[in-house]
Amino acid sequence: MENNDLTKFKELVGKLPFLKKEIAKVIVGQEGVVEEILIALLAGGHCLLEGVPGLAKTLMVKTISEVMELQFKRIQFTPDLMPGDILGTEILEEDHETGKKFFQFNQGPIFANMVLADEINRTPPKTQAALLEAMQEKRVTYAGQNHALPDPFLIIATQNPIEQAGTYPLPEAQLDRFMLYIQLGYPSEKEELEVLEKTTGTYRPDHKKVLSGQEIKQLQDLTRQVHIDSELLVYINKLIRSSRPATTTVQAVKDYVEWGAGTRAGQALILCSKARALIHGRFAVIPEDIKTLAFPVLRHRLSLHFRAEAENVQPDTIISQLLK
């Protein structure tokens, strides 16, 4: 790395602790979840966030966008939502001077830096699939025309793990497009007491903007420059291949996994490990980065068969066995 890049690295990375501090003014606890969302942003991926109602998922995402000067949009997914409601539609306009009529593309709510797709599993596959091109290509195609999405661009989709009546499970192809599958748990007793105290009184958090969109793009570029040793690359490759029943020596995989993770999982694990190293002020990946992120990277990429469901074996249990 050149000296100029090193100086830029130190300046930008030095802002990350302040970023977390500003978010913590609004969001009590959940440091791990906030860090994983930031990791996905720096790695250039998208998140699937799962948690029961009332855990401030929307507030968390909105706060993260505010402290980074990012445009935020929220889409409430419902059974009657159509692709055009997300991507946008063409509207017939008229030139007042010439009287000539023409079609003008009216951008949908997907055109934002950070998009919260709330309860994504409440809408049919046709509408879910409308996000695929946006997530992968970071553009929208309408009537043969390409419309670039803002940069940086991050989709955070939420789903409720409890209520499954009237929901449409995400197809495997779309699940794989999410870089991380983040599980949001209940706060600790102390954290919950602090939330109750702050949100029912006169406390009004005043959080400041820490990073600009341009600085986030620079951090995304720096993330890819983070060093990862060849031995760790081999380790990640073996980890991913061991998640597949046909090429594994792990008994839990043979017993419970129908389909293992694909190559995209290895790419995601490498990029996320680099992003975590950057967030922790390092310019090299260490084994702890890989082991921490193996869970959110792999848990939605392992397809378990009926025996796992019958014996209540969860993906995280399989991943723990893989890491051993």
Image: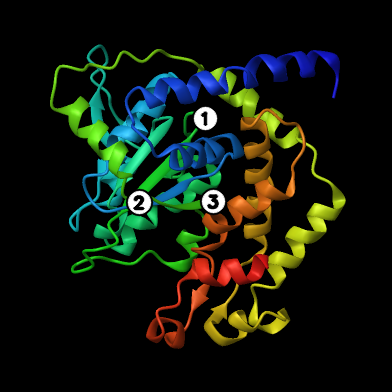
* Element assignment for label 1: loop
The picture quadrant where one finds residue 71 is top left
Residue wearing tag 3:
179
Name which residue lies at 30% across and 38% down: 190
Check the picture and name the quadrant holding the C terminus.
bottom right
Measuring 37% from the left and 48% from the top, which residue is drawn there?
157
Work out whether mark 2 precedes mark 3 in sequence or the reverse, and give the earlier one: 3
Front residue (pair 189, 8) = 189
Tell me which amino acid carries mark 2. Gly
**Where is residue 278, by image quadrant?**
top right
User: Disc 2 to disc 3, how far (Cα)?
Assistant: 19 Å
Q: Amino acid at mark 1?
A: Pro
- Disc 3 residue type (three-letter): Met
- Say whether marks 2 and 1 touch (CB < 8 Å): no
Secondary structure beneath dot 3 equals: loop
Q: Earlier in the sequence, mark 2 or mark 1?
A: 1
Say which mark, if any, is on residue 218.
Answer: none
Within 10 Å of disc 3 (Cα), the crowding (few <14, some 14-19, many 20+) is many
Q: Residues within 10 Å of mark 1 (few under 14, many from 20)?
A: many
The percent position of residue 138, horizontal first and vertical second, equals 51, 40
The first of marks 3 and 1 along the sequence is 1
Question: Horizontal placement of 23 versus 108: left or right?
Answer: right
Residue tagged by mark 2? 185
Point out residue 220 in the picture as x, y percentages from the top left corner: 63, 31
